[in-house]
Amino acid sequence: MASWVVVGIDNGGTKNNTTILDETGKFLVDTLVETPSRVKEGPDVAIQCVEEAFLGILEKTGIARDRVRAIGFDTPGPATAEGVMTAKGSTNFSHAGWRSFDFRGAVEERLGLPVLYSNDGNAAALYAHYQAFGADAPRRSSVSAIVGTGLGGGVIESGHIVKGQAGMAGELGHIHIPMEGLLGEGQALPHCNCGLYGDVESVASLTGIIKSLLPYWLGRFPGHELTKLGSVEQAAKLCRSYGEKGDVLALKVFEQQAMAIGRLFTIAANFTDPHAYFVGGGVVEAAPHFRDWFLAKVKESTALRAEQLPNARFALVPDLDMAGARGASLAALEWIRTR
């Protein structure tokens, strides 16, 4: 039996997901283990929930607390490399108490264990990387795009998360991409919540569907069933299910998203030249035929050089609901091994 373990905690807008990884790299939890995160109620409540998640996973697995060497902890961004939340607040951390709050440090103080912080997109990217490459992971590189309410992601180089000096590396959603040939006739340049026009997130995100893509395509399919719903927000949440059924309007929306991610990966191909390109988010949770179609469209929209094509891998992020916690725990294990 392994003598020590690390705990991975993925902190989200509504749930904490938790896992345990032993010193040999074996995950001791095979299922999703979720508890409420209550982050919208502010730091005091949220930290208590993190502690409850930590104690709950130990109880579930029968692991004694003194066997835990460190905690891998991730949250949605934006935050610094050290886990200090942005001064401006964010979608999940809108409570005033989160502004410039040292979340990592507070969890470390509460639990009395070293806490290694990762952005949630970085954590999922690290997990995808190690699942794909196994023992070769330290000798490989990858880029991941995670499609959700916004667009997160991660850059992995030689098996390590690239965080950057301020922790903002891997914020792939806010990279400008060419819009010529992506937008339809008369389609307005999409606007991102960050203030930019024409970045990846303005297209490849649920927010992009609501603000830009769906209103445009609904106008070109008068009488479509989605126009009969009460709001664009409701229609956007159903758009993927229509895409799974082969609905032409929905496929137009997701084809634009796939093109946006492909153009992002084209930039990555000329910037970091990774071994693999991973896509995560809602498409991973879709029917197999739809997610395979979407990934094929992403690959089709990624312009690689002849020299890059033979060894470039395109794949979906596996086990998406568990990917954040697992990636966070892998980062903590790596930290211990390299100290």
Image: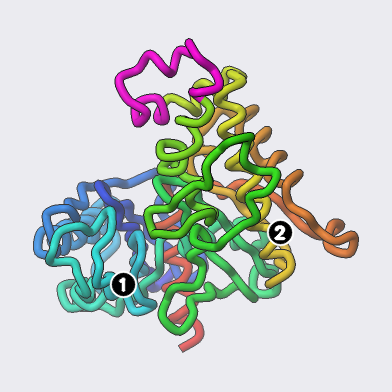
Which quadrant would the N terminus be assigned to in this image? bottom left
From the viewer's perspective, is 227 left or right of 180?
left
Residue 67 - label: 1
- All told, the count of numbered labels is 2
The answer to whether residue 126 is visible is no
The answer to whether the residue labelled 2 contacts the one labelled 1, judged by CB atoms less than 8 Å apart, is no
Q: Residues within 10 Å of mark 2 (few under 14, many from 20)?
A: some
Residue 72: quadrant of the picture? bottom left
Q: Is residue 185 left or right of residue 313?
A: left
* Disc nearest the viewer among 2 and 1: 2
Residue drawn at x 37%, y 53% as measured from the top left: 193
Q: State the residue at coordinates (64%, 74%).
A: 138
Closer to the camera, 282 or 213? 213
The residue sitting at 53% across, 47% down in the picture is: 189
Q: Position of residue 203 (x, y in %)?
A: 52, 45
Secondary element at tag 1: helix
Q: Main secondary structure of the magenta part?
A: helix
Q: Quadrant of residue 67?
A: bottom left
Q: Residue 173 vs residue 265: left or right?
A: left
Write the start and end of the magenta stretch as one range. Answer: 218-237
Q: CA distance from mark 2 to mark 1?
A: 44 Å
Question: Which numbered marker is on residue 92?
Answer: none
Q: Could you tell me the amino acid type at mark 2?
A: Thr
Residue underneath mark 2 = 266
Give left or right: position of 61 versus 110: right
